[in-house]
């Protein structure tokens, strides 16, 4: 079984991938909830445009998304140069860039799951909370959020899984630098490009499967717990 | 406490144009489905914003479109009991009950949690989840949740409509206690004349978005025009006192201003007073004292008015002592018997509606 042991470089790729995915998921979450709420509840001019832009990463070839990120968030890109100059935030060829790419690719999945759960909320319950003295912000925090929690969890797990598997946009935007931007899929890809890399590719593939399964089981357990609490199940 | 409403609002092809004032302890908004009662109570509650008009309760202006004033629902300090209880599924009964209290300023919290729980008999449900409660239990918890928020006014939108008869009679006594034991004025929406007869101190009768009658319950219900309510529910409200019971025939002896009545035994102590509805369809008129009749209650009455024709039938209003009794008879009988105002006839009453299953309790002191 010795062949199963991961080399230090492989461990680095695994850790980096998990770090990138967690950051992508957590940073995307507030935006995801806000956009999902906007799309589910509000009527405004240009709603279908917003909806289209949110879903674009799902439809575009990932390489195109990665290239768009490169020209906007790259060191010379209009947004990238501003962020770098004034806030010291650099995306290009850093793990933060990988997280940005993963987050953007995972965003539509997250928004979809949360939006569906917001649309399923019984608005009469929110009205009832209002008559009991809760301001709109309190209603959101004490009624809406608990009721959409299963959808939010589902959205986060989906986003995490998507981020773990993201390859095309990441490698286009931030390349494939071991220890900085070489995530799990990039590492597997690299193994398949060198002679004798099969075993390494297989090891990382098994790790991928294990992480994906763990995420799935965790989400099932969480969702069951939450829905038992809500008496939905 | 006074409630003053004067609004006009358009909802699609339906329009509401209603104005009334009430200082009663339980004001019933009464009318058939689609008469605008729920829309009206939603305007009082801040769930619908009227296009024009003014609503004020107890000196607080809720909305005044002329003054561009709008108080959002959460700042009105109302207790709203919905037809569907609308309990929060993610909270326990205890947490549901405490929800509104959290938002009530500390010095304005007058409701006593344990007292309300006792009054509604929901102490054994506190740790349960709403989904495990029966319809009647849910509605009691919903009433408790509204009360514990220490509201300045209670709004109840057909709180019994979704319940079966047994559950209704389970809740009615609690609403009566609410009316008689707390100082909170109640606005109660209903399309059931029997419910209104039993509960209301004041009635606002609505039809097609307009107020057709408003005032103390006795006056309004006794003179309601057929259009205002479900035709089967038209009738007159009579105040009774229980004189005693007749165990041989299982009857109860009652007294009203027009005389003595015998009815199937009701569960009330001698001396108890209550009001009940005598439905127009349960009253027959005779020009001579009937003989050999199975009906027990025959009253000498004087016709005071004849309503507009409704198909083959019309309503005949009569009076006996201070009681008003309304009969629904065919127009052929009206012509054939020569019924007209001033004629003395006999009213044969086949039944008194006690709001099925509802045990009468003390009459409201209006």
Image (spheres, rainbow, N blue to C red):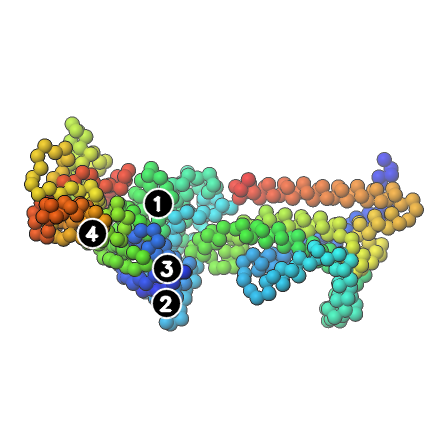
Give SS at disc 3: strand
Which mark lies nearer to you, 2 or 3?
A: 3
Along the viewing direction, whichever of B211 and B276 lies nearer the viewer: B211
Which mark lies nearer to you, 3 or 4?
A: 4
Q: Are marks 1 and 4 on the same chain?
A: yes
Whole-number angstrom distance, CA of label 2 to CA of label 3? 15 Å
Which chain is home to disc 3? B
Which chain is home to disc 2? B
Quadrant where the N terminus of chain B is found in the figure = bottom left
Q: Are marks 2 and 3 on the same chain?
A: yes
Residue A1, x across and y down, in percent: 85, 35
The residue at which mark 1 appears reads as B160
Crowd rating for badge 4 (residues with CA inside 10 Å; few <14, some 14–19, many 20+): few
Q: Residue at x 23, y 49 (%)?
A: B311
Does residue A200 appear left or right of residue A91 in this picture? right
Q: Earlier in the sequence, mark 4 or mark 2?
A: 2
Q: Residue at x 47, y 51 (%)?
A: A125
Q: Earlier in the sequence, mark 3 or mark 4?
A: 3
Q: Which mark is residue B52?
A: 2
Which chain is home to disc 4? B
Q: Residue at x 79, y 70 (%)?
A: A76
Q: Dots 2 and 3: beta carbons under 8 Å?
A: no
Residue A167, x across and y down, in percent: 78, 53
The residue at which mark 3 appears reads as B14
Whole-number angstrom distance, CA of label 1 to CA of label 3? 25 Å
Does residue B57 appear left or right of residue B92 in this picture? left
Which residue in the rendered view is the most extreme toward the top?
B248
Q: Earlier in the sequence, mark 1 or mark 4?
A: 1
């Amino acid at each position: 079984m010795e062949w199963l042991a991961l080399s230090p470089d492989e461990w680095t790729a695994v850790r980096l991938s998990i770090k990138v995915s967690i950051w992508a998921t957590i940073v995307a979450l507030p935006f995801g909830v806000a956009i999902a709420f906007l799309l589910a509840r509000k009527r405004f001019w240009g709603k279908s445009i917003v909806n289209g832009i949110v879903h674009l990463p799902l439809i575009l070839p990932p390489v195109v998304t990665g290239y768009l990120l490169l020209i906007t968030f790259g060191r010379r890109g209009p947004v990238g140069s501003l962020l770098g100059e004034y806030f010291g935030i650099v995306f290009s060829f850093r793990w933060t860039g990988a997280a940005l790419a993963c987050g953007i690719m995972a965003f539509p999945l997250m928004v979809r799951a949360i939006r569906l759960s917001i649309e399923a909320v019984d608005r009469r319950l929110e009205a009832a909370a209002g008559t009991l003295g809760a301001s709109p912000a309190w209603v959101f925090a004490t009624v809406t959020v608990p009721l959409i929690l299963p959808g939010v969890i589902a959205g986060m797990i989906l986003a995490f899984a998507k981020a773990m598997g993201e390859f095309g946009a990441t490698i286009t935007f931030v390349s494939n630098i071991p220890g900085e931007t070489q995530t799990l899929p990039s590492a597997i890809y690299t193994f398949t490009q060198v002679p004798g890399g099969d075993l390494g590719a297989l090891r990382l593939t098994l790790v991928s499967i294990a992480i994906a399964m763990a995420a799935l089981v965790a989400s099932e357990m969480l969702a069951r717990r939450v829905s038992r609490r809500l008496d939905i199940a | 406490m006074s409630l003053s409403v004067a609004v006009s609002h358009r909802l699609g092809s339906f329009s509401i144009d209603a104005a009334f004032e009430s200082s009663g302890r339980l004001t019933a908004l009464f009318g058939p489905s689609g008469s605008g009662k729920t829309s009206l109570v939603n305007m009082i509650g801040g769930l619908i914003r009227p296009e024009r008009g003014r609503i004020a309760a107890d000196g607080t202006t809720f909305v005044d479109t002329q003054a561009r004033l709008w108080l959002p629902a959460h700042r009105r300090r109302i207790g709203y009991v919905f037809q569907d209880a609308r309990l929060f599924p993610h909270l326990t009964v205890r947490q549901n009950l405490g929800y509104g209290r959290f938002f009530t300023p500390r010095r304005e919290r007058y409701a006593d949690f344990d007292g309300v729980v006792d009054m509604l008999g929901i102490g054994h449900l506190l740790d349960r989840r709403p989904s495990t409660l029966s319809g009647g239990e849910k509605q009691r918890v919903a009433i408790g949740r509204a009360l514990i928020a220490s509201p300045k006014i209670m709004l109840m939108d057909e709180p019994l409509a979704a319940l079966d008869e047994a559950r209704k009679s389970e809740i009615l006594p609690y609403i009566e206690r609410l009316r008689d034991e707390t100082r909170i004025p109640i606005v109660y929406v209903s399309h059931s004349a029997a419910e209104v007869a039993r509960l209301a101190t004041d009635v606002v009768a609505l039809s097609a978005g307009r107020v057709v009658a408003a005032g103390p319950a006795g006056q309004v219900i006794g003179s309601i025009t057929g259009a205002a309510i479900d035709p089967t529910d038209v009738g007159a409200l009579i105040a009774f006192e229980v004189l005693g019971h007749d165990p041989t025939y299982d009857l109860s002896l009652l007294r009203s201003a027009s005389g003595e009545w015998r009815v199937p035994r009701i569960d009330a102590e001698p001396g108890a007073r209550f009001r009940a509805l005598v439905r127009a369809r349960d009253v027959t008129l005779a020009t001579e004292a009937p003989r050999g009749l199975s009906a027990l209650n025959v009253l000498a009455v004087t016709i005071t008015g004849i309503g507009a024709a409704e198909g083959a039938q019309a309503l005949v209003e009569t009076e006996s002592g201070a009681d008003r009794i309304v009969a629904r008879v065919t127009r052929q009988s009206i012509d054939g018997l020569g019924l007209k105002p001033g004629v003395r006839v006999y009213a044969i009453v086949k039944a008194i509606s006690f709001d099925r299953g509802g045990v009468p309790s003390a009459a409201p002191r209006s």
